[in-house]
Image: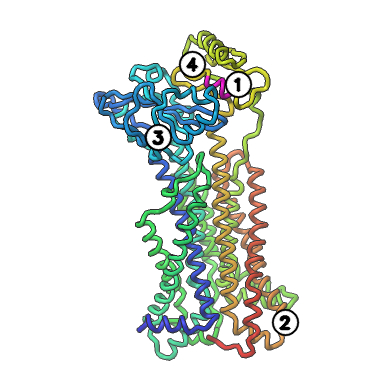
Amino acid sequence: MNLDLTWRLLKGGGRKGLLGVWLTLGAVAVSTALLLFAVAANLAFDARAERGAWRNPVPVAKDAAKDAVAVEASRFDYVRDRVITVVDLAALRPDAAPPPGLPRFPKPGETWLSPALAELARELPPAELGDRYPNRAGVLGDEALVYPGELVAVVGHAPDAPAMTAERSDDWLMGKPPVRVASLAGTPSEDAEAYKVLAVIASVLMVVPLLVFGGAAARLTVARRDTRLAALRLVGATPGQVVRMTVAEAVLVALAGALAGAVAFALAVPLLTRIEIQGGAWFAGDLFPGLAVLAGVLVAVPLLVGLSAVAGLRRVVVSPLGVAKRETPPGMRFVRVLVLVVVLAAFPMLTQGTSVAIVAVALGLAFLCLNLAGPWVVGLIGRITAGTARTPARLLAGRRLVDDPRSAWRTVSGVALTGFVAGFLGLLSPGAFAGDDGPLQLRVLAPAGQAEQVAGQARERLAAAKVPAAVTVVKRTVVAAPSGSPDAADVDRARTALTGLVPGRTPTTEADERNFSDQLLADVRVGTIVVLSVSFLVAIASAGITAASSILDRRQTYGLLRLAGTPLEVLDRARRAETLIPLGVMGGGAILVGAFCAMPFMIGGVSVAGVVTLTVCVVLGFAGVIGAGALSRPLLRSVTADPAPRPD
């Protein structure tokens, strides 16, 4: 009975009533699609970490040395400023299981290249790349790669080969020294774990505004629905019936929106795979969440919307007559702001020397408390605006903010929460390292007491490869500087000539040694852009949808004001002021709160690039809200054109 009546009321709401349903459906669809993206990003980094774990082997215990089946080491090579991961393997038993992506364990002297590296070796002259990896036996499968297009080489050795016995650095930036392993099932590397931590923090910055937006979707056209439900209460409907009808309506619309959002996300995956982070793009399968995750999101989103809708029913259930008479609800308490102040005061302590989980929770709390305090501050802004108004438009805007600060906050909350993200990430956004690398020089660390001998071998190799270069020794480091003005091809020919000069070590330039830090900085910038882009989508969608919903909620009021002689332009200016005044105050306040929360993580002062990012965010945020609000002006003209406005 309740479901049938709910369906009839949905269909019987008229064209504008159905428009309200479509607005809610669109809001839920946007929230679901972006929520799936945030969840999928974490799962994708997990998948990358698992696929690359075999390169970070776990050594056998000293008392279990007899269980070792292989020796594994890794290092990094370079070509055209791109990183090549080289994994050296030696089998200790004939039945040693091969690494992922290989049909068998590589024999001594064999080399297996990833598809992208094999193609690059065919494109470049052998002296620049191919000669470094002779005796190529095959191509690695995708199971061995962290991302498509990764450059990886697996080289087979004998257990007593110099490459498997020579001393190597234990710095993960340079690779891993040879270790005896019981299997090639290793653990995620340190850089993979770092990216997983960054992904969690980015997800919190994206998910909390999405959850707020998704919950607000249940409150779209809330005034029209409350009036309708209050009328049903007054004619005899029980509180339980009202709650069930509300849940049925919210869940039906939210489920349809969630399904639409899931389809939109699936269609967007091919584009999302092109976002390059951690050195490359993504496998499409990494960004598709499993069926369990998809089902969980499709259940959680309608449930959130249903709970949010029920949470707003207190006045309808307790005081239906007050709702029907459109009485102004009681004001909110200052405790909302007090909670935000307490959380901000405790934030620096929560983020000192704690786990990423606690940092993520602290950020989430700051987000939610900002959202909790927002309506109270908007109400205060409304009282100040109404008290200082000198024009009819500002007076109408101020009175509207006082009358329903929650609705006004929903219109600007998206951009305000985006301001928090911009304030937090913008000031942390790193700039590129400055400085000149100086002349291109290849350096390789020689074994103790052998630097001059290695330098002589380097001169012979470079001369045989017809690469003119000056070779010098600085302590234990052999430095080879190609003559003239060397280009990338000259440097790569010199690299190839010096490959294997010192077993287990790769000739590198200063730029090579800085590659991983540069990559991390670039990835943080990309991540900042992605998070802010998602936040802007939420903000603009929220502003546009809630602005249209607000007009539908107040269409009778707008119609009566229009009949009373109020010019349409005055109503439109009042509507804009109702948005822009709290937006300016709350947006600026949210940016300051975000910057405050970023202070415990700031190292080396404020980034100039971050300030520029923050400025662009503010400009785009205001422009997006103004543009989204302008799109609803035809709807305002439509509802005020009705000569006989009536309640729903």
Q: Nearer the viewer, mark 4 or mark 3?
A: 3
* 10 Å crowding of disc 3: few (<14), some (14-19), many (20+): many
Q: Amino acid at mark 3?
A: Leu
Q: Which residue is mark 3?
A: 140
Find the distance from the CA under tag 1 to the CA under tag 4.
16 Å
Q: Which residue is mark 1?
A: 441
In terms of sequence position, does the residue under pointer 4 or pointer 3 come before the other?
A: 3
Q: Amino acid at mark 1?
A: Gln
Would you say 504 lies left or right of 629 here?
left
Which dot marks residue 567? 2
Find the distance from the CA under tag 4 to the CA under tag 3.
26 Å
User: Which residue occupies the foreground of this view, 60 or 110?
Assistant: 110
Magenta residues (range): 490-496
In terms of sequence position, does the residue under pointer 3 or pointer 2 come before the other?
A: 3
Q: Is residue 494 magenta?
A: yes
Identify the image quadrant of residue 66: top left
Relative to 55, is 439 above or below?
A: above
